[in-house]
Image (spheres, rainbow, N blue to C red):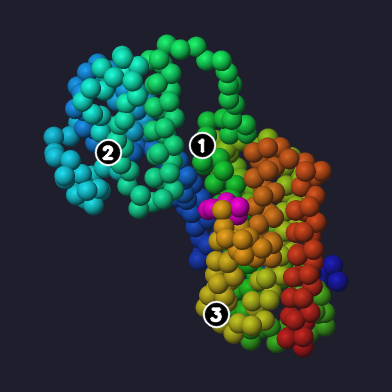
Amino acid sequence: MYRIIKAIAKKELSQVMRDPNMLRIIFVMPFIQLLVLGYAITTDVKKIYTSVYDYDRSGLSREYVRSLSAGGYFITGSSNISLLEADKGFRENKYNATLIIPGGFSAKLRAGQPVKIGFMVDGANANSAAIALGYINFITGQYNLKISGLSQSIMMRQKRLYNPEGESVDYMVPGIVTLLLTMITMVLTSMAIVREREVGTLEQLMVTPISTPALILGKTIPFAILGFVEMSAALAFGVLWFHVPFVGSWLLLYVLTFIFLFTTLGMGMFVSTISKTQQQAMFLTWFFSIFAIMTSGLFAPIANMPQSIQYLTYLNPLRYFMKIVRAIMMKGATLNDLYPEALAMMAFGMAIFTSAWLRFSKRVK
């Protein structure tokens, strides 16, 4: 049986390597996606273009405006237009925020009196608007402490763990790697089996002495190997190009990846049993992937989702693998930290792969 599995696996790998389109899908497209998504998908909010209406025109008001520009979060510039035209500027996307400093700003500060300033932000993107408001509140608080000259009774020392620079790419790249691994293994498995059915060679294989288990293993093992190669190359690219830290155990990551592959390979087999053409297989794979991606926590924290959707995410194996990869890479998590996710992923993997195996065996007989 070992020789049969090896022969089928070798034949599958040869077919993949001889197909230029398949090689582009496996090795070129994922790296383009990783490069583009690594830069494009970010939760950082910088370069908030802000028009400033400074009616005080004093040294203190100019110093306050300069404090906003520190760190590159607010890009400030004077504006000569009327405040009545501020809404037009927002609609034309000329700026994202407007700061209004009233007259008497410095006089009231020197007298120890409270000063009210105006800050309007474009709320079309609610997340960016909330972050911008957080920035302005923090900077204003720091500026107020600076000019007050008052001693603080409570001193707070802050430290950002695991991602000290606050780079969103360190959080997104591990998630993109899991997405690429999922898509590649599911698509390749489903399309390879459907392709055999399309050209009529699957039936020819079934009339040979090859057993169904040998056929299934011979069909899936090559794509598991390609999945490991794909993930390794993507991780290396993320670490070397994006400088994403990897502080955990590579061995633990690969062991848990092997468990996760039972899920993706099983889904690929399941799709192949309900598809008659490669186009149908591609569409169904994309359909399942959309659910997995949107409920995995890749783009939005699961805790921010509606309660009903949060319960639904427990049915998504990608949710557990996403957490595992990020925890191992960024936090150096061990199996003691991740065993609940590992057990859940193992249960899903065995259930999905066994069900797909039984359905596939019944379909090809």
Residue drawn at (32%, 26%) of the image = 115
Residue drawn at the location 16% of the way across and 44% of the way down: 84
Q: Foreground mark, 2 or 3?
A: 2
Task: Say if 294 sits above or below 279 in the image.
Answer: above
Q: Residues within 10 Å of mark 1 (few under 14, many from 20)?
A: few
Secondary structure type for disc 1: loop
Point out residue 364 in the picture as x, y percentages from the top left corner.
Answer: 73, 85
> Observer-nearest residue: 244 or 314?
314
Q: Which mark is residue 214?
A: none
Q: Amino acid at mark 3?
A: Gln
Give how far apart the Cα atoms at labels 1 and 3 are.
Answer: 39 Å
Are dots 1 and 2 in contact, CB under 8 Å? no
- Work out whether 177 lies above or below 356: above
- Prevailing SS of the magenta stretch: loop
The disc, 1 or 2, on the residue closer to the chain's N-terminal end is: 2
Q: Nearer the viewer, residue 142 or 288?
A: 142
Question: SS at mark 3?
Answer: helix
Residue, far right: 1
The picture quadrant where one finds residue 297 is bottom right
Tell whether 186 sits left or right of 78. right
- On the question of residue 150 being in view, the answer is yes
Quadrant for the C terminus, please.
bottom right
Whether the magenta-drawn stretch holds residue 151 is answered as no
The one of 286 and 11 positioned closer to us in this rendering: 286
Magenta-colored span:
298-303
Tag 3 residue: 280
Q: Whole-percent x and y of residue 113?
A: 33, 20
Mark 1 — residue?
167
Q: Amino acid at mark 2?
A: Thr
Residue that numbered label 2 is attached to: 98
Where, quadrant-wise, is the N terminus in this rendering?
bottom right
